[in-house]
Amino acid sequence: MTVFVVGPDDRGFFKKQRTTWEFEDALNQASDGDDILIKQGYQFSTDDKNYVIDKSINISSEVKTTMLGGLLLKNSAHVRLNNLSLWRNKEKTNIIQVRENSVLIASNVALTNRATTGKNYPIIYIDGGSNVKFDNLYIEKDQISDGAYRIYAEKSNLEVYNSNLNCKVNAIESIVNLQNTFITYNDSNAINLKSKTQATLKNVTIVGGLTEKNYPCVWVGDSTINLIASIVRQSNYSAALYLQKGAYAEIDSSRIDSIAAYNSELNLQNESRISESVFVKNHSSLTADNLLIDGKNNGKVNIYVTQESSFEADWIGLAFESSPNIKIEDNVTFNVPDVYVLKFDSTNDEYDLNENNQYTIVKDNLQNDIEYFTTQKKEQVHKAEKDQKDLPKGPQKSGMQQLDEMIGLETVKQQVKEFIAVTVLNKKREEKGLNTSSQTLHSLFLGNPGTGKTTVARIVGHVLYEKGVIAEDKLIETSRADLVAGYVGQTAEKTRKVLESALGGILFVDEAYTLAGGGQNDFGKEAIDEILKFMEDHRSNIMIIFAGYTNDMEKFLETNPGLRSRIPNKFDFEDYTVDEMVQIGLFSLKKQQYHVNPSSYADLLKNNLSKDNDNSNGRWVRNLNDKIIKKQAVRVAMTDSYSEEDLINITDADLDAVRL
């Protein structure tokens, strides 16, 4: 074993040969089993480098030393780190990467990314069956605050002890063990566990979540979490710990502000304590020994159980009595022999105990005060659902599912899938530190009106947000009237405000060719110039879609030489076939709960389309349906009395009334 001493150049008048090393030289020369010792006073290179380690070595420092740059462990490397502070000043960069079955054991390490603009990548990235263990790790808060500052582990093992983390912990198909650690993160979930992850947290305090955007402090999906003597803090919210998709949580001697379980299992032991509320929904189950619920005011009932779920406990102790504390749907299994109000000291935030170290019962037999409701009483169900309106949304169709379900547009669907595949692959390569091809998101949507351009744009936004490519799931629709003003100098400011409103998401410019259609002195040119400058300054933080007729958009691109090069992605929206328009019309009527004879409707649409086709596609169909519904309404309104069937049935006579 060789020890490489890294330190200042120690040559002098009486010492001609240097006995210390530069860090990078030592790293290159070291072999498996060697040690690198960094001496006090050594100054690392001012270049922000990524040091690659593919061997098994130990790196330590006499005193805590700051290093500018990152470490990449790969190819089954085994590395020990001690007494180092690593920092970087770049967006889209990791500080520590551990990949390809590598092992990292680190103690007394601090990590900081001082970038103030751009986008965060994981500060620690772990994958490929690697094993990472930190003791006394400190991660400083980031400055970008985009919700993506995190430790990311995929198909690996992560252990963290005696640490302070100002970032998210995100694990997929991994084993996570956290002990004696404090986690704070308020820009998204503080902990996010997915896809068969197994996590054990002992004596861990987690403070975080983003209530305004409905991000729970701890999110668990299709995974297992074991909380032992731990705390989860997110006040005035109903899902500080959120379980879904078959998650399982075992909670022992812990305190959690609130819990929401969807299609999940929850087991509470040793008088675990809930500060605000517990919601158990959608075939979930909760079992507990003795459950304490403080019931601090977050505007919700203390316990809400519905949708064929089950709730079992030896007894429930409440700090306060309200009306009601508990709401139960009649299809639920609710087995709790005793419900009490206990004496509670609000000043010390503790339950009072008597001389026998037992809880003091203020009121018992609260089972009689439980409010039961039934799915048959719709007004009660609707009120109960309204009371829970700030719960995180349950599983919904993905953007790709919505795209596949759209009628027609086969060419566009294929183009969109290819575009998204390349975009997401580039993002993943960037996250793993691999070289990527240059790509911009800005796009052209070409085609006639009513061909689904806005709908597809919204779906693309959903998918890119789901995949983490864009920061926000939003689409801002705009047109010439929103961008162009009537006087010199006003258009740039007006356009800039619209562009800034779409930052982080998508700006959809409808009939974009009108910006270039007013001649040399038209203010539309000023809007185009402002858009071009904004696209260049914010290339990674906005997607701009320019939509319009194919021929007119080609002329639009020719008005400014910078447009075509900055908008490389083109999507061609073909007109709907007649049969596709029939499908669209029938689907729209069905969605509005109307009944119509499909063959009669198809015959009407084909007849009218052959005589009055304005090439507006879906808009033409909507206009036809509006005419049909008006005729049906007039017919029904003229009758003295009518049934529910009269309100929803469209007759052949109604169809004939709009036939051309």
Image (spheres, rainbow, N blue to C red):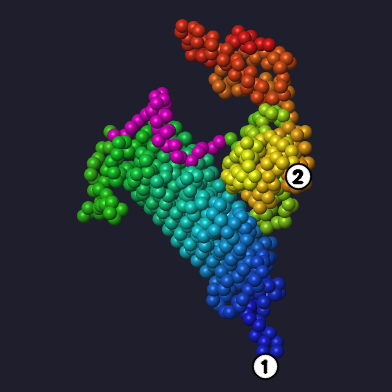
The structure residue drawn at horizontal position 65% and vertical position 14%, both measured from the top left corner, is 601
Q: Secondary structure at mark 1?
A: loop
Residue 607 rendering spot, x and y as whole percentages: 71, 13
Q: Earlier in the sequence, mark 2 or mark 1?
A: 1
Look at the image and say whether residue 114 sits in the magenta stretch: no
| Quadrant location, the C terminus | top right
In the rendered view, tell whether residue 52 sits above or below residue 1: above
Magenta span contains residue 375: yes
Question: What residue is pinned by disc 2?
Answer: 560
Q: Is residue 445 visible?
A: no
x and y, in percent, of residue 528 in the image: 69, 44
Q: Quadrant of residue 494?
A: top right
* Disc 1 target residue: 14
Residue furthest to the top: 640
Which quarter of the figure is the N terminus placed in? Answer: bottom right
Q: Which residues are magenta?
A: 369-396
Across and down, in percent, residue 436 comes to 72, 53
Q: CA distance from mark 2 to mark 1?
A: 69 Å
| Three-letter amino acid code of the residue under disc 2 | Asn
Could you say which is closer to the camera, residue 28 or residue 429?
A: 429
- Identified at 63% across, 33% down, the residue is 455
Image position of 377 with respect to 358: above or below: above
**Mark in the foreground, 2 or 1:** 2
Task: Specify few, some or many for label 1: CA neighbours under 10 Å numbering under 14, 14-19, or 20 or more.
Answer: few
**What residue type is disc 1 on?**
Phe
Q: Is residue 263 left or right of residue 575?
A: left
The x and y percentages for residue 37 are 61, 77
Q: Is residue 532 visible?
A: yes
